[in-house]
Structures are given as C-alpha cells and as structure tokens.
Image: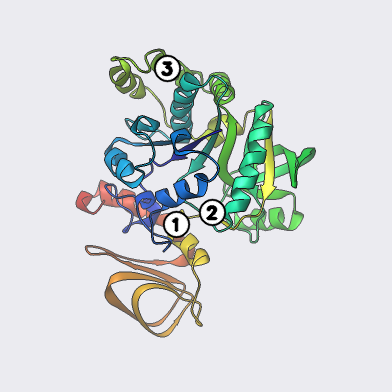
Amino acid sequence: MYAVILAGGSGKRLWPLSRRERPKQLLDITCQERPMLQETFARLEPLIPADAIYVITAEQYMESTKEQLPAVPESNIIREPEGRGSAPAIGLAAIHLRHRDADAVMACLPADHHITEAEKFRQVLSVAEQVAQQGHLVTLGIKPDQPHTGYGYIEIGGQLMDVGEHTVCRVERFTEKPEEAMAKRFVEGERHSWNSGMFIWKASGILDEIEKHLPRLHACLTEVERVLGTDEEQAVLERTWSLVEKETIDFGVMEKAEDVVVIPVEMGWSDVGSWASLVELLPPDGDGNVVVGHHLGLDTRSSLIYSPHRLVATVGVENLIVVETEDAILVCSRDRAQEVKALVERLDEEGWRNYL
C-alpha cells in the first residue's frame, strides 16, 4: 500500500496563524511539538515505508515540504500547479502511482488530521487495504459523539463483511455539513458516521471512476500520464492544469459511485479545520477556556485564547475565539468560526493581501 498525504491547502479558517506562505499543515497548531505534516508522516511510517509515502502540495510549499520530510524521496513530492480541490489532486497522485505500480492501492489522507490512537489508525488502514484490493472504494467513518455541523456525514447501509475486528458496510449516501437539527437526527439514529475524508482504493479504480464521473478531468490526467518521467512532463502539466475545474472528490466522485463502502472506527480523530475544532481538541481550564500562550482572564468562560507573543487580557466574555499573531488579531464568536474563511476572502477583495 502507498500513502498520499494531501497537503496543498492554505487553511483559511485558521487565519491569522495559517497564512498563504505558511499554511496550517506546516505549523504546530495542535501543540504536539511538531507540525501537522510531520505528525501525519510519523503516524504512517510504522506501517508504510518512507519511499511509499507521497505528498501532493502546491508549488509554493514544495521546498518547505521537502525540508519537513527529508526521509521522503523528492520524486515522491508531487507539485500541483494550482489548487483545484481534492478530486484533481487525488487524480494527479493516482497517475503517478499507477505509473510506478499498476496494482497500487493508495490511502489518501489529509495532512491536517489529529489522531490520538495511532495504532488503531494503522490497524484500520491495513483492513481497508484488504477491502480495496477487492475493488471497493473505501472510506473511514468516525462514530459521532455530538451533532457536529462542520463535518459531512455518511449513512451506513448493510453489512458487507467482517475483517478482523472491523465491520465493512455499504454506503447509502453522503450528506454535506447538515443543519443542526438534521445532525441531531443523524447522531440519535446511530446509522451515520462522520465523513473523515480518508479514502483507500486502487489507483486504477479511482481513475476509472474519475473517467466515468469527471471525464474532462480524466482527459487532462491522461495527457499528463502519457508524458510522466519525460522532459515534456512539466510543460504538459502546466498547460492541462489551466483547463482543470475545481472539484472535491466527495461531490465529484464518491456521491455518484456505486461500489463505496465504509469502515466505522473510533480512534480519537479530529479534523483541525477551524479554530472551533481546536477548542474541542485541547484540554480546557476550570472555566472551560483553552489557552495557548499568555492570557489573564476575569470572568472569562468557554473561550479559546491563542496568544504566543503577547499577553491577552479578557473581562466578562464567553464563547469567544481570540487569536494573536505578530501582525494581526482575530476576535470572533465560537459558533461562527467557520466564517473566518469568508473574512480571509474579504481581505483579498479589499486589498489587504499582505495579511494573507
């Protein structure tokens, strides 16, 4: 099995810490004493050797990625000319793997996940490899412990097989980030899992599905695959990538594919996609505050204070997110943390590009 770490995003919802030139995957946001990209690699290495681990990232992060993962061969770090979403990124990685190994099974794993039970993660990945070898498209589903509206959900269908301690089930349908009332019904009904965004399949299999559901993308990938390893590769990649439309693998392929299965698992998983997710991840103090850095609070509750440089003092506030960096400060309500992405887009529109 090969691993593909998806590490091309800019992490807009974690602004102002995550920036265009130094995104979240290159930072130690979760206080683990190493960046999330290195955490992801370390989680994989006991199962998958470094020369079978690939990283797909944006051009501007290539050098930083090489510096952070010196054990990964440079040829395994794939350059995406411009971010086009997870479907093109996974497709590009898949043609590289099929070029190397026609029977390759690939595990597609975002670089911004936090998993506390790494051994359980490796066990379920091994099970998923066995299922993927049979031609199934496999996703890992996380048992929900709350009606989270920031995650997608997977409706679990009939049982397909047992592999060791794990049950493999059919997927009935995917639901993208539901409203709270629907999320509550999903959790109470116990037939849904969170969509982890981790997928395992044959490289050839996902390319077949891309051909079926995203034919224009497949045509571009075929053109690039034809010149892999030649002097033409970079020029053809640049030319074809300008024609590729943005698309997620979930909407573009998984919601339409027929042979999709899910392995429900509990492994201490968190998607570190916003400041609100960090509140859920790090231990709170007696007032429910999560503090990273310097904070003095009076009558302050249920807030995140991220202040590595300067003292942040608060009085009479609750459910706030306060993030301090050397050149910018964010203050927002916890329940609107997902909207930080829209704020970053406003920065771009209004000419504050030096803060991006």
Pick the front one: 195 or 74 = 74
Q: Is residue 95 left or right of residue 234?
A: right
Place of residue 105 in the rendered image (x, y in percent of width and height, measured from the top left): 57, 29
The Cα atoms of the two marked residues, 2 and 3, are separated by 36 Å
Q: Is residue 353 left or right of residue 13?
A: left
Residue 225: give its label.
Answer: 3
Label 2 near label 1: C-beta < 8 Å?
Answer: yes
Instruction: Tell me what residue is drawn at x 51 percent, y 82 percent.
Output: 286
Residue 255: give its label.
Answer: none
Examine the rendering and report whether any part of residue 178 can be seen. no
The Cα atoms of the two marked residues, 1 and 2, are separated by 9 Å
Three-letter code, disc 2: Gly
Q: Secondary structure at mark 2?
A: loop
Vertical comparison of 132 with 305: above or below = above
Q: Secondary structure at mark 1?
A: loop
**What residue is pinned by disc 2?**
150
Quarter of the picture containing the N terminus is top right
Label 1 near label 3: C-beta < 8 Å?
Answer: no
Place of residue 346 in the rendered image (x, y in percent of width and height, measured from the top left): 30, 51
Instruction: Tell me what residue is drawn at x 47 percent, y 55 percent.
Output: 272
**What residue is pinned by disc 1?**
274
Say which label, 3 or 1, has the lower sequence index: 3
Three-letter code, disc 1: Ser
Say which label, 1 or 2, has the lower sequence index: 2
Place of residue 348 in the rendered image (x, y in percent of width and height, measured from the top left): 26, 47
Q: Is residue 269 left or right of residue 71?
A: right
